[in-house]
Amino acid sequence: MRIYDLPTPAALVDLDILQRNIQSMADAARRAGVRLRPHVKTHKMHAIARMQLEAGAVGLTCAKVSEAEVMAASGARDILIAYPVVGDWQIERIVRLARRVQVTVAFDSEFAARKLNEAARDAGLVLPLYLIVDTGNRRDGVLPGEPALQLAKKVAALPHVRLAGIMTHEGHVGRARDEEELKAAVAAAARDMVATAALLRESGIEVEQVSVGSTPACKSGIVIDGITEWRPGTYVFNDVNELSRGTPLENCALSILATVVSHSAIDRAVIDAGSKTLTSEPARRGGAGFGYIKEWPKAVLERLYEEHGVVQLNGEACEIGQRVTIIPNHVCPVVNLMEHVYVTRGDEVIDQWPVDARGKIQ
């Protein structure tokens, strides 16, 4: 089948670009001397997880417990749940999963650590934990240095959990205004993590892994001694946010195929991809509209309704029935809306992959 025979809207994944992106990050991690533990929240697919593991990833990172359960079936034997888990349902499932594969759990409070300790005690297990450190994203995590040390000391006294490392998500670096500012933010976050690990070790608390994670940070070229693990996610596909940071268009592996369904004004078109396909998330930096239309580089996808995308053409030639391909602003939530993606090579559809962990929100 050829791409333009598909029903629309449809998610297309260019296999050659995907493989190149996976190999490029694996090679970069090897050059940096760090373990690669990619985040599956971007793709949520067994097929891609296996490709990452085969390229040398030590394990996978997941956001939610239900996502980790699905990914355990991909062949991963080592999974990090990089989220502050406190719910009883989730903790019960973690313990169950930990009997099958190695599971490490993130936390940022004594409350969470004690709940995990109690569940592990009842199951006869010792659960490894990562302490979340806030290096500037202002989301979850304790501050570097002394606040991290004080929480680590409390957790070190618990017999059924083990502090296996510290982690941060330096997502704030993606808001940098230019490359120089981005690199400075990446370096500052990494230095905070290394200094915090040193402080814990000086106090007798073993810290095996010092884990950082964001695609912009891992692509930045900044390597700081003492960082042991990377957890990028978006790099497998890339998106408009990554384009705005200098990623070439030819490295965008996922696009949305859409059809022009209305052209009732000379400079306006309507496509059949709206917020139920592309989400209504704006670009974080430098982007206009709700996605980049490859065939119409001057056009702006200016409005989204549930099933309609309204395009300001800005002089681009358009016909009803025309097919266009759109790079999403933020690819991760877009994939979560898909039941499957079509795998392509050139103009041919060569496979169809289910989005195995779509909708896994617990």
Image (tube, rainbow, N blue to C red):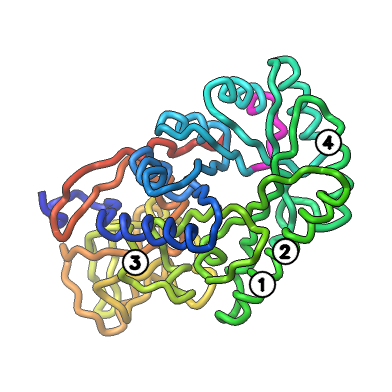
Q: Which residue is rendered at x = 24% and y = 80% of the image?
A: 316
Sequence-wise, the earlier of marks 1 and 3 is 1
Q: Nearer the viewer, mark 3 or mark 4?
A: 4
Q: Residues within 10 Å of mark 2 (few under 14, many from 20)?
A: many
Contact between labelled residues 2 and 1, with CB atoms less than 8 Å apart: yes
Residue designated by label 4: 156
- Element type at marker 2? loop
Q: Which residue is rendered at x = 18% and y = 56% of the image?
A: 345
Position above or below: 240 against 84? below
Sequence-wise, the earlier of marks 3 and 2 is 2
The image quadrant that residue 299 belongs to is: bottom left
Position above or below: 103 against 324? above
Q: Which residue is rendered at x = 50% and y = 61% of the image?
A: 281
Residue designated by label 2: 136
Tell me residue 319's x, y (percent). Answer: 16, 71
Q: Distance of mark 3 from mark 2, alpha carbons?
A: 28 Å
Q: Distance of mark 4 from mark 1, alpha carbons?
A: 30 Å
Residue designated by label 1: 185
- Image quarter hosting the C terminus: top right
Tell me residue 151's x, y (percent). Answer: 85, 44
Q: Which residues are magenta?
A: 83-90
- Element type at marker 4? helix
Sequence-wise, the earlier of marks 2 and 4 is 2
Residue designated by label 3: 251
Q: Is residue 347 left or right of residue 206?
A: left
- Element type at marker 1? helix
Q: Distance of mark 1 from mark 2, alpha carbons?
A: 9 Å
The total number of labels drawn is: 4
Q: Distance of mark 1 from mark 3, alpha carbons?
A: 24 Å
Query: In the image, what residue type sits under mark 3?
Result: Asn
